[in-house]
Image (cartoon, coloured by chain):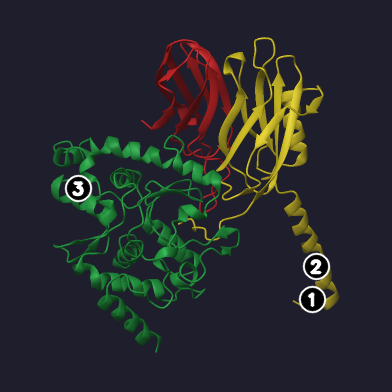
Chain colours: A green, B red, C yellow
């Protein structure tokens, strides 16, 4: 019964386009970035590029962009020249990859470049180097509105991501929507519940004391609901990322954000 | 080489009090955390930070594990003459990093 | 082996209960008020510490104990005749009482230092300033620290 209703909602969403209202979706006018839920002190850390620890990763990314991935081959700069060419890229990821026939996120895109064009090994997920490169590229989209999910080829995957967002899981039997659609701006223990708009990834999370990706945060949430988290790079995580980014369409990118 | 972010005004008037902000990439491992199997993760922190203005030390700090990761330290000094600020971070396991910034004082 | 009677079992539980309680209070990984006092004494010696002149800017309710912004400032003309030599910050409940020592001088212009600190639990922070005339001044602030609602397991 619940499954049938989920499919019906997914079909409604697919047919009517992203902007349509599902059962408990946050109205467009009420959407807020996680930034707005933070204390003034934490906001001040994000707003100052010389105090934001995420900017250290951006600096590391700059060095990597210009260095050879492999002694005999090019650096990112060898094909893309100036990183300014990356403006707008993070705002439209996860994007559809023709060869794979499915969406990939920015980290996967960087690794595909390394393997296919730099003859280098892919960087492990959550490694310092992959985070630095992703942060460097994504920072180029800072201030630009999110456009991810508009591509018609992505519709079935956005729908899958929506299904994942709505489906209860784990020992606590919670769906993402239970907190982030229905109870945002309330508190869970001492922490504010946000709307889960991924406007600033990769971001510096004070809890992690380091930069981390959206997939790390999603796995963190799943562990919080006592569910078995999907592996890094799993299609489910990319679909969730895609759904979340499309749900945040129009909101500006904040990378590298700071969150508690 | 770990990244550092330094914020020093490029120009200042003689006698003006300027604010210097520094941010250094470092895990600041406290030495009190344990691995999943129970072993203590050994301490690895920056223990001291110093700033020299044209060779003269104008600020120094002793840091302890209670300083947050990626240490951020802000302090002030009086702009006396044009020249160079040199920053030095020293820590466990032979950690030693420097950075510098120039200033024009008119 | 005979099953222990109810009476002896109650005695057994009472003994282990108090033993557990004893173990908890002897737990070393936490500073005690005595450690805080002796850490302050290491800096101050036998001098009297007066309250005043020092200001501690720290959020009363922190979003995350891993990174707490803190600013210490001291009212002082910062002239060669009258300046702040050093500022020492302490805490009550982290494993160690010291947070940081900051050494200034008349060239500082303003006696003000900002940094970000870690706080393991809700506790008191103490900042002590040593002036050029040898006097010590202090201030303390109480901070409430909450734990994050969803934490990661260590893989």
Instruction: Work out whether A50 lies above or below A176.
Output: above
- Across and down, in percent, residue B69 comes to 50, 39
- Is label 3 in contact with label 1 (beta carbons under 8 Å)? no
- Is label 1 in contact with label 2 (beta carbons under 8 Å)? yes
Q: Do the residues at discs 3 and 1 belong to one chain? A: no
Instruction: Work out whether C129 lies above or below A50.
Output: above
Q: Do the residues at discs 1 and 2 belong to one chain? A: yes
- Front position in the image: A81 or A218: A81
* Residue that carries the numbered disc 2 in the rendered image: C12
The image shows a total of numbered marks equal to 3
The residue most toward the bottom is: A1
Name the chain under label 3. Answer: A
- Front position in the image: B90 or C72: C72
Q: In which quarter of the image is residue C96?
A: top right
- Across and down, in percent, residue A27 comes to 42, 69
* Residue that carries the numbered disc 1 in the rendered image: C4
For the point 52% across and 73% down, which residue is it?
A: A172
- Across and down, in percent, residue C62 comes to 61, 48
Helix, strand, or loop for circle 3? Answer: helix
Name the chain under label 1. Answer: C
Q: Which of marks 2 and 3 is in front?
A: 3
Name the chain under label 2. Answer: C
Q: Earlier in the sequence, mark 1 or mark 2?
A: 1
Helix, strand, or loop for circle 1? Answer: loop
């Amino acid at each position: 019964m619940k499954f049938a209703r989920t499919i019906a909602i997914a079909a409604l969403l697919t047919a009517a386009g992203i902007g349509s209202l599902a059962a408990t979706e946050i109205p467009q006018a009420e959407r807020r970035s996680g930034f707005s839920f933070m204390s003034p002190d934490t906001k001040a850390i994000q707003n100052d590029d010389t105090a934001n620890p995420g900017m250290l990763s951006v600096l590391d990314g700059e060095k990597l962009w210009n260095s050879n991935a492999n002694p005999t081959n090019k650096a990112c700069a060898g094909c893309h020249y100036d990183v300014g060419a990356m403006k707008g890229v993070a705002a439209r990821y996860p994007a559809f990859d023709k060869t794979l026939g499915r969406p990939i996120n920015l980290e996967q895109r960087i690794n595909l470049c390394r393997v296919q064009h730099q003859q280098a090994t892919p960087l492990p997920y959550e490694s310092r180097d992959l985070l630095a490169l992703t942060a460097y590229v994504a920072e180029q989209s800072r201030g630009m509105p999110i456009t991810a999910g508009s591509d018609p080829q992505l519709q079935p995957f956005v729908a899958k991501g929506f299904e994942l967002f709505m489906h209860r899981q784990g020992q606590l039997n919670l769906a993402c929507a239970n907190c982030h659609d229905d109870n945002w701006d309330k508190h869970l223990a001492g922490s504010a519940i946000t709307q889960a708009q991924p406007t600033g990834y990769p971001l510096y999370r004070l809890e992690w004391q380091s930069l981390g990706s959206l997939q790390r945060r999603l796995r963190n949430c799943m562990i919080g609901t006592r569910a078995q988290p999907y592996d890094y790079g799993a299609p489910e995580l990319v679909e969730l990322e895609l759904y979340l980014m499309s749900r945040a369409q129009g909101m500006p990118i904040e990378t590298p954000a700071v969150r508690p | 080489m770990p990244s550092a972010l330094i914020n020093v005004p490029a120009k200042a008037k003689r006698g003006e009090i300027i604010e210097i902000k520094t941010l250094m990439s470092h895990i600041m491992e406290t030495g009190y955390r344990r691995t999943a199997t129970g072993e203590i993760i050994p301490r690895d922190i920056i223990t001291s930070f110093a700033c020299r203005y044209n060779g003269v030390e104008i600020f120094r700090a002793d840091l302890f594990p209670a300083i947050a990761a990626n240490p951020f330290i802000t302090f002030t000094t009086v702009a006396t003459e044009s020249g160079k600020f040199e920053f030095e971070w020293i820590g466990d396991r032979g950690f030693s990093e420097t950075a510098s910034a120039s200033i024009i004082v008119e | 082996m005979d099953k222990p009677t109810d009476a002896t079992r109650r005695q057994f539980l009472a003994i282990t209960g108090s033993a557990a309680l004893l173990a908890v209070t002897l737990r070393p990984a936490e500073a005690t008020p005595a450690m805080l006092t002796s850490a302050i004494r290491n800096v101050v010696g036998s001098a009297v510490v007066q309250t005043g002149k020092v200001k501690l800017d720290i959020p009363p309710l922190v979003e995350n104990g891993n990174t707490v912004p803190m600013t210490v400032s001291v009212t002082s003309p910062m002239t060669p005749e009258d300046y702040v030599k050093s500022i020492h910050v302490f805490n009550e409940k982290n494993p160690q009482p010291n947070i940081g020592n900051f050494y200034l001088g008349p060239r500082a212009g303003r006696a003000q230092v900002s940094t970000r600190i870690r706080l393991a639990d809700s506790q008191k922070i103490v900042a002590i300033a040593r002036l050029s005339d040898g006097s010590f001044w202090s201030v303390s602030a109480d901070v409430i620290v909450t734990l994050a609602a969803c934490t990661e397991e260590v893989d």
